Image: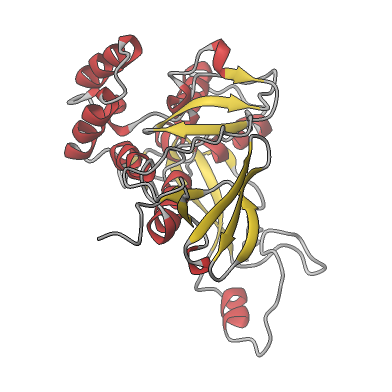
Amino acid sequence: MARKEPPPTDHTIQRARAETACATCAASIAADELALAEAYVSTDGKWARSHRYARSPKHVDPMIRGDDGPNADLASRLHHLACAAQHQPYKLRSALKLSGDLIPHRAELEQAILDALSPKDHAETDPATRDEYARFIERLRATTDDDDFLVFGDWLQSIGDPRGELIALQHALETAINEDRARLLDHERKWIATHHFAPEQPVGQLKWRRGFVRRVYRSTSASRLDHPSLRFLRPADLVAGDEPAPPIELVKPAKAKVGGEWRVRHTRKPEWGIGRVISEDETKGLEISFEHGGVRTVKNVELLEDLDEP
């Protein structure tokens, strides 16, 4: 009786024992062809079922070897090396480090892994749009009109590139207040995370504007500018210190009340009601008496028209 092969515990590069289908592209992998053997946990085995129907959760990592050996539901599936470089770059990189065999075209595989891990916009990689994308980028590098980014965003949205939505979101945030601003900020945060618009390696505190990072505060010395979101940064935009406090800009309303009294509303605490400005300090902010919030010193307020006049 043949001895049962032990379950895999790592991603490896091995030769296919017989012709089989690639788990990525479904095309044939020839017998004796080198392929990535990806270790994965089956969802239909005994171990998986015992955890699925357990009375209490079993907080066990299925990939960790225990007293009884590795999880019996671990299995392996094969991928073409080229497919793995594009779709499983981290697993192939790990397998290449473990492999002591001579891998044909290893340099090309490692370059393909690097390309797969280098973030790019969809429009930049699509052969049908990459030339137009490059022309837009060149125009934006030379322009002094920020509205050109809105034109770029409209084009990106028309071809389904998610950065177009980010540009529209951040443009809307420039004028949004209160509940609308909170909703847009949440959408922006999730959109950036979902589409990996922020660099994986920390570079500092990012200041976004219309789809791209325009300044980095607390910048690290190792900051790299090859990420698409950082492509418009200049060395002068990498600031070692903290972001300065925004200046207080208070403009008199079009309909000023007799005596120059200003009425305001807090942009994040509308429930405080209408406030009357008592005094102004260049560093601390405005001292305001709110209808329902008492006297507070704040900065985030919007100026209102005279409320007593129609």
Q: Is residue 229 above or below residue 57?
A: above
Question: In screen coordinates, is 210 left or right of 223?
Answer: left
On the image, which quarter does residue 99 sit in?
top right
Q: Position of residue 304 (x, y in %)?
A: 39, 52
Q: How is the image coloured?
A: secondary structure
Q: Residue furthest front?
A: 259
Closer-to-camera residue (110/276)? 276
Q: Is residue 74 above or below residue 302?
A: below
Q: Residue furthest top?
A: 142
Q: Residue at coordinates 52% horizontally, 16% vertically from top-left? A: 107
On the image, which quarter does residue 160 sit in?
top left
Q: Residue furthest bottom?
A: 55
On the image, which quarter does residue 228 sit in?
top left
Question: In screen coordinates, is 292 left or right of 135?
Answer: right
Q: Residue at coordinates 20% horizontally, 35% vertically from top-left? A: 154
Closer-to-camera residue (302/290)? 290
For the image, the number of numbered tags is: 0
Q: Residue at coordinates 44% horizontally, 30% vertically from top-left? A: 119
Question: In screen coordinates, is 247 left or right of 105?
Answer: right
| Residue 104 visible somewhere in the drawing | no
